[in-house]
Amino acid sequence: MSQKRLKIEVAQAALRHVEEGMVLGVGTGSTVEAFIDQLAASGKRLNGAVSSSEETTRRLKAIGVNVVDLNHTGDLELYIDGADEVDPHKRLIKGGGGALTREKIIAGASRRFLCIVDGSKSVPVLGEFPLPVEVVPMARALVGRKLTALGGQPALRDGFTTDNGNLILDVHNLDLVDPREMEDRINRIPGVVCNGLFAHRAADRVLIATESGVEER
């Protein structure tokens, strides 16, 4: 089964968790794009959605969903997003699409976080995928040195600016055996806005599309 088909399968499975009339948190990335397409096809109506990126906002508006400001919603019942990696404890690496800060904010504001991935994203230990770190531009070199001191190899994501006007350093070869500790250590570096470890706020439920069906974790 193609990766595109797996994304559609897991997107369809996620729709079972979406209730008519809810205000839904919606993430960013190719699997979320498949979810938005399936949401449109399902005919389910939302009262609104909180979006994690300008691209997701554009796609939601294109199917007639009202995009609302998180400041006006209070806590959300459900947030649906993908991941670049997920471990057996439902901890994640996110930010391949560069929306990690807004994604982490929405996840923190949501009672339930449903992560949808294809089987290639399921790993025994996080870290093969380089860890995205959003950085204030003036702190790029400082943060890079600090990340190197932590054992990583940071690389500037060339030509990319986040929706918040910041830069992304993609950090290779970090030891993420204890992702909660590393999440904290990176966030304490001056100039770091956010990093892509979702260890303190892990997913509550993960749907994984495989050749044999959608597994639930």
Image (tube, helix red, strand yellow):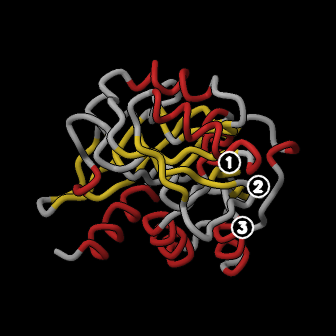
Dot 2 amino acid type: Asn
* x then y, percent, for residue 116: 39, 53
Disc assigned to residue 164: 2
In-front residue for pair 2/49: 2
Which residue is labeled 3 in the image? Answer: 54
* Residue 77 in view, yes or no: no
The residue under the point 50% across, 34% down is 147
**Sequence order check, earlier mark of 3 and 2:** 3
Picture quadrant where residue 108 is located: top right
Mark in front: 1 vs 2: 2
Which residue is labeled 1 in the image? Answer: 102
CA gap, disc 1 and disc 2 = 9 Å
Q: Is residue 74 above or below residue 209?
A: above
Dot 1 amino acid type: Arg
Q: Is residue 173 above or below residue 8?
A: above
* x then y, percent, for residue 111: 60, 32
